[in-house]
Image (tube, rainbow, N blue to C red):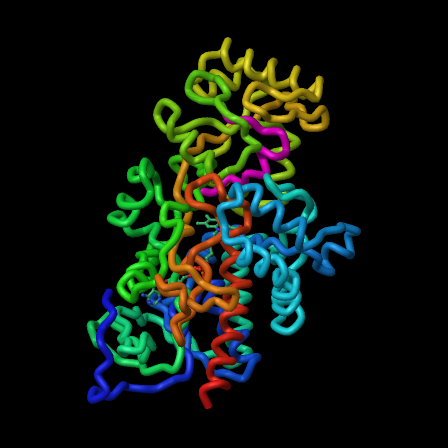
Amino acid sequence: MAVLPFEPDCPADIHVPLVIVGAGACGISAALAAVDAGCEPLVVERDAVPRGNTFLSSGFIPAAGTRFQATRGIGDSVARMVADIQRKNEGQADPVIVRTLAENSAGTVEWLADRHGIPFDLVDDVRYPGHSVLRMHSTPRRTGEELIACLHGAAEAAGVDVVTSARVCDLQADSGRRIRGVRIARPDGVRETIACDALMLACNGYGANTELVARYLTGMETAVYFGHEGNQGDALLWSESLGASLRDLGAFQGHGSLAWPHRILISWALMMEGGIQVNRDGRRFSNENGGYSEQARKVLAQPGGTVWNVYDARIHDFAMSGFEDYRRADQAGALKSAPSAGTLAAVLDLPAAELEETLRETAALAAAGAVDRFGRSFDPDSALKPPFYAVRVTGAVFHTQGGAEIDTSGRVLGSDRRPFPNLLAGGGAARGISGSGDSGYLSGNGLLSAMVMGALAGRRAAALMRERY
Ligand SMILES: Cc1cc2nc3c(=O)[nH]c(=O)nc-3n(C[C@H](O)[C@H](O)[C@H](O)COP(=O)(O)OP(=O)(O)OC[C@H]3O[C@@H](n4cnc5c(N)ncnc54)[C@H](O)[C@@H]3O)c2cc1C
């Protein structure tokens, strides 16, 4: 991974206007936007089958003021979405970038739906912590697998060229901070050079790079990494070499509910519907409605680093009907059930008296609509009733959120705050909007940054081409 000096005497194998590194949600959104704006991008992807973190995700993207919300009579606004995002990150994100993403969120979801046939709709039955209204959008199966398949189908229909099994290993830059091309490595060791007029980094963060995790994510060195192995920090390393302004390098999305040892994501919707988490002592230890990202550290801090999600048949039925991952967990034998608190304690090998007391206390809080000592509000409608269900979970790192600062069109900023002339970035490859640690991540910040900034940067790259010729 290096930034090499541009050598005019070494001819490139091909020349294209725009190279996009990475074929996840960010890269494909950028490519579709560039094509629509009259520019022909080349997407270069290291894997034989492009997947990225997008494939692993739940595929939920937040957007404010969409027609999908209007159809359900849900009133939302850019100001409200900005307030939700900034409340979660305690005002640490760049307010101009947050506003830009919120302002363009509805337009991006509707453009992808209407022009490129991505079958988005509002997720109208799952409330996510920190969003004051229903604003998550997804494709019908609610999986990242479906989202990435739809995006690649759209890219193919739009004539976007995606070169796979091609890892970008080096960038070439001239003395004027202009990117002149990239070198790619094929699995058989063959190297090729692609000259370009503009470069977009859409190759996500550094979650799979243990050295960078140890450097920036203090205390999470031994946590399970549940993201894509392609997140090797290439964009961060190039940005650093180029002298970009780097911010929030300790920011990441964690998750406090990864079925263990099955490694299947158990939706946080279980907690939002009334579920609780108990540790090996049969005790609750946190506000489960606070946020699933910061919950990773709290779960890992419990004895043995695992806890049980405990819920009831109503929540089980809801999750079975709404979440493919949950059904997979069921098939994998990760779910336990029992007719009473006492028998559940025996099934889970937890101290019976403590678990019974925890469930009694939770029922009393729900009946009273009270707030507990951790600050969680309980609601009579979501009181847990036998029979009970449970799944053992651990905390994990999903993806990192820090990186190169960008402007509102995705142009990478140098440490002098001047944009590089033809270098863009988005999604996990750039600084996100989740503050500096683990608690600033509001659900959906990942795909919001990837798809909305991807689209903005793709348009900006096309504009750069028009200005150039
Ligand atoms: C389990 C899980 C659930 C999640 N759920 C959600 C959710 O519901 N909503 C949400 O908003 N976010 C969610 N996220 C986060 C979300 O997945 C990411 O923020 C988003 O997918 C990032 O998109 P991207 O295009 O930037 O990166 P990716 O999708 O990771 O794509 C990057 C691509 O770049 C390729 N690449 C890397 N390096 C190179 C290189 N040197 N050369 C060529 N190619 C390269 C990779 O192979 C990869 O295909 C979730 C994450 C996980 C792990």
Please report the bounds of the magenta region as a residue range: 264-277
The answer to whether residue 274 is magenta is yes
Position of 137 with respect to 232 (left or right) is: right
- The residue at the point 38 percent across, 71 percent down is 420
Res 333 visible:
no
Instruction: Quadrant for residue 299, please give it.
Output: top left
Position of 418 with respect to 210 (left or right) is: right
Q: Is residue 111 above or below residue 253?
A: below
Location of residue 404 in the rendering, given as x and y in whole percent from the top left corner: 38, 59
The answer to whether residue 82 is magenta is no
Report the front residue among 131 and 240: 240
Position of 314 with respect to 437 (left or right) is: right
Give the quadrant of the N terminus. Answer: bottom left
Location of residue 103 in the rendering, given as x and y in whole percent from the top left corner: 63, 60
Report the front residue among 414 and 351: 414
Q: Is residue 467 above or below residue 312?
A: below
- The residue at the point 50 percent across, 9 percent down is 353
Q: Is residue 361 above or below residue 379?
A: above
Res 201 visible:
yes
- The residue at the point 27 percent across, 45 percent down is 215
Location of residue 313 in the rendering, given as x and y in whole percent from the top left corner: 63, 29
| Residue that extends furthest to the front in the rendered view of this protein | 416
Report the front residue among 229 and 180: 180
Report the front residue among 342 and 64: 64
